[in-house]
Amino acid sequence: MGRRRIGRLVARAAAVVVLLAGAGAVPAAAAETAPADIRTAIEAVPGLRIVEEKPAAPGFRFFVLTLRQPADHHHPERGGFEQRLTLLHRGADRPTVLYTSGYAVSTSQYRSEPAELLDANQVSTEQRFFGASRPEPAEWNDLDIEQAAADHHHVIEALKAVYRAPWISTGGSKGGMTTVYHRRFYPQDVAGSVAYSAPNNVDDRDDSAYLDFLRTVGTPECRSALAAVQRALLERRTALVDRYQAWADARGDGFALVGSADKAFEIAVLRAPFMFWQGRGQAACPAVPAADASDDALYEWLSDVAQLPVYADSVANQFIPYFYQLGTQLGYFPVETDHLADLTRYPGAAEPRTFVPRDIPMRYRPQAMRDVDRWVRTRGEHLMFVNGAADPSVAEPFRLGPGSRDSYLYQAPDGTHSTRIAQLSTADAAAATATLRRWARA
């Protein structure tokens, strides 16, 4: 199943504030710029705690917060945890965007595209079990889409006392999926939702859509080049794995979770075509190394495209909750191995189970994704899906149906996993922006 490229998540802390420029800005005379009592108003919200206020751009205030959440919303008496949030405050009279990546939250300032277009406040949430937002002890059965949706519902209910204008929810990749799941269980929480590059793996037993996509995307020459570089990497695995292990040793890292540097290397090679099309696309084909390229060239290309650092323990352990979710509800994309069968050593190594310790039980529950897909097609409303046509993550996208009301699906012809409204055609971008602004006036 297609997923947001994990390496981009590793670098997420480098995100910076993006200020609105142009259409949609509130006239200076009408804009409220951080009233002096906003901190007092936030502190009055039950269960909410201000961790710190950080410097912000003119016209904004930026807070790192926590909100007390039940570990199990069905049994709040069983204890809870503090969910980490950030708040980029623009004005109490402005719309508010609920943003999630679906992973840990960055405590650096970041403004999503909907928040820019609406000149809105933004509340960014950390997914339960990620980052600092984990119950102790962790009961893994409490990590499911319904519990996470209840977390988001609680965030909105708590902060609506301060921010009474309409709310919009948004996220990309796993965050886009999380956005849709929240709407499935709490459809009235927000006035509209924008889900970017959100996969929809309805039936994890049938992953043919992903394989078919990867067999036809781009040009035949580029696909052949990717297959050839995969073979070259595995044929030279001894030297390249030694280099990978030396890199880990030098930083005091290891591969205990995955099993070994050799296994991690093979997984990265198998996932490379998917990651290439997801993050780069046809324009990057000339940079694919030839099969006879140097070891240095092959290693650097793989490290960049498949993000070799993410398989080492220091990063992989942070994403155990992600792979747990893939293996229990969300499903996962397959990798093509037939053309490399004589060179692979670890059958099934790219499956989620590899990335979750064996003492954590995993049982796949197929009904969850079917239920969400059915809801989108039969009862979903005020939903907007923005995808890139060249992104394998959305080989199985969310689709609208006869019961989808005031909902839209947009696609950028050459777009990758980072596609946004701004990358759509002029007409589609204008229509999407107009719809978003209409929702925010609801």
Image (cartoon, helix red, strand yellow):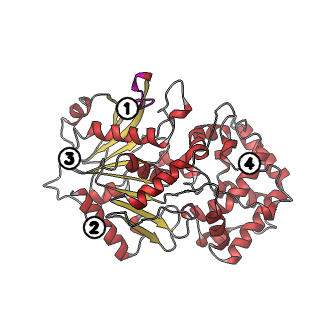
Q: Amino acid at mark 4?
A: Ala
Please state the horizontal and vertical placement of residue 359, each as a whole percent of the image. Answer: 67, 30
Please identify the quarter of the rendering in which residue 43 is found.
Answer: top left
Q: Give the residues in magenta.
A: 65-77
Q: Which residue is mark 3?
A: 33
> Closer to the N terminus: mark 4 or mark 3?
3
Please state the horizontal and vertical placement of residue 92, each as a whole percent of the image. Answer: 20, 44
Q: Which of the numbered marks, if any, corresponds to residue 434?
A: 2
Q: Residues within 10 Å of mark 1 (few under 14, many from 20)?
A: many
Judged from the image, the secondary structure of the residue bearing numbered disc 2 is helix
Between the C-alphas of marks 3 and 1, the distance is 23 Å
Judged from the image, the secondary structure of the residue bearing numbered disc 4 is loop
- For the point 51% across and 48% down, the residue is 368
Between the C-alphas of marks 4 and 1, the distance is 37 Å
Judged from the image, the secondary structure of the residue bearing numbered disc 1 is strand
> Closer to the N terminus: mark 4 or mark 2?
4
Q: Is residue 383 above or below residue 321?
A: below
- Camera-nearest label, 3 or 1: 1
Give yes or no for contact between labels 4 and 2 (Cβ–Cβ under 8 Å).
no
Between the C-alphas of marks 1 and 2, the distance is 33 Å
Q: Amino acid at mark 3?
A: Thr
Q: Residues within 10 Å of mark 4 (few under 14, many from 20)?
A: some
- Camera-nearest label, 2 or 3: 2
- For the point 53% across and 49% down, the residue is 367
Q: Is residue 116 visible?
A: yes
Please state the horizontal and vertical placement of residue 266, each as a whole percent of the image. Answer: 76, 52
